[in-house]
């Protein structure tokens, strides 16, 4: 028998977001520790500096192409490979192709969008890694770009995909209820992971920010997939 009280109040969206951030705490801390180690290594350990400088040269040479390809690999290819290996026990299905048809162009566009955003911030606020400039970029990234551009685009398009690309009832994407119940939890969960990460990214030279954004996205996908599998086994 269903004993749930239908009149019970809905959970506040920020509480749902905090719970999501707490559930992802371990992989988030691992990711943040790796990114911090890379930041310290860049400034204090010459072999790391040399390796990261080579990434910067590649980024400078390939430009937006680097941003697009790295985002596709990090946001589309790696998640699908991990889904096949971890959740599908190595069996490839039509669903994997369907996912890639959506995620490849989505992450290609998001990679270019992030690159444009980073370049714009460097022009407007400066490219130096001073406390003021880094703090300003982090504020605009996490409290303007993320909640008002990146999060809505991601929520809308992924929900559109999950609906079978149907435009029926698409008006709900622009309601207060959708923003409250879907977007706000995502924003809070995002802050738990990415606030420290973007602080580290903006403390590095501009040409390294996109390469390490892609690396952070890849690491996050790998760690999140691993932790999800552990939860499913428990």
Image: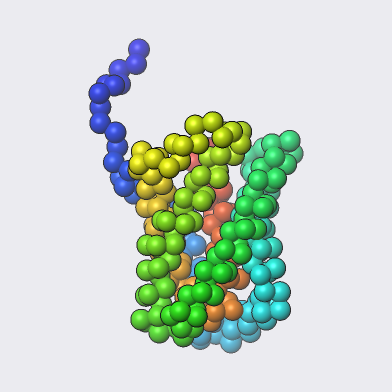
Instruction: Judge from the rendering whether residue 131 lies leftward or rightward of residue 127; answer left or right.
Output: left
The residue at 46%/83% (across/down) is: 126
The residue at 51%/86% (across/down) is: 44
Q: Which corner quadrant of the image does residue 223 belong to?
A: bottom right
Give whichever of 158, 21 is nearer the camera.
158
Where residue 144 sits in the image (x, y, percent)?
39, 62
Where residue 181 sits in the image (x, y, percent)?
37, 40
Q: Is residue 21 above or below residue 170?
A: below
Q: Which corner quadrant of the image does residue 145 belong to?
A: bottom left
The residue at 49%/41% (across/down) is: 231
Give whichever of 176, 2 is nearer the camera.
176
Callout count? 0
Q: Quadrant of the N terminus?
A: top left
Instruction: Judge from the rendering whether residue 59 lies leftward or rightward of residue 212; answer left or right.
Output: right
In the picture as drawn, the residue positioned furthest to the top comes out as 1
Q: Is residue 54 above or below residue 175?
A: below
Instruction: Judge from the rendering whether residue 211 lies leftward or rightward of residue 227; answer left or right.
Output: right
Q: Is residue 139 above or below residue 92?
A: below
The residue at 47%/75% (across/down) is: 121
Q: Is residue 35 visible to the viewer in this orientation of the structure?
A: yes
Q: Is residue 23 visible to the viewer in this orientation of the structure?
A: no
Where residue 166 sits in the image (x, y, percent)?
59, 33
Where residue 47 sits in the image (x, y, percent)?
62, 84
Q: How is the image coloured?
A: rainbow
């Amino acid at each position: 028998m269903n004993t749930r009280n239908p009149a019970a109040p809905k959970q506040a969206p920020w509480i749902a977001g905090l719970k999501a951030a707490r559930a992802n705490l371990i992989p988030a801390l691992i990711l943040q520790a790796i990114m911090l180690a890379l930041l310290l290594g860049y400034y204090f350990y010459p072999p790391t500096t040399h390796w990261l400088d080579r990434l910067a040269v590649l980024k400078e040479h390939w430009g937006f192409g680097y941003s697009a390809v790295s985002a596709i690999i990090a946001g589309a290819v790696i998640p699908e490979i991990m889904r096949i290996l971890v959740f599908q026990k190595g069996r490839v299905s039509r669903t994997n192709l369907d996912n890639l048809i959506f995620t490849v162009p989505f992450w290609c566009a998001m990679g270019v969008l992030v690159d444009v955003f980073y370049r714009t911030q460097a022009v407007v606020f400066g490219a130096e890694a001073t406390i003021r400039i880094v703090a300003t970029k982090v504020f605009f990234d996490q409290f303007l770009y993320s909640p008002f551009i990146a999060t809505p685009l991601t929520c809308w398009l992924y929900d559109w995909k999950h609906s079978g690309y149907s435009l029926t009832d698409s008006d709900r994407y622009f309601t207060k209820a959708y923003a409250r119940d879907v977007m706000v939890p995502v924003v809070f969960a995002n802050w738990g992971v990415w606030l420290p990460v973007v602080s580290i990214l903006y403390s590095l030279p501009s040409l390294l920010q996109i390469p390490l954004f892609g690396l952070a996205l890849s690491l996050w996908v790998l760690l999140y997939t691993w932790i999800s599998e552990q939860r499913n086994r428990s």
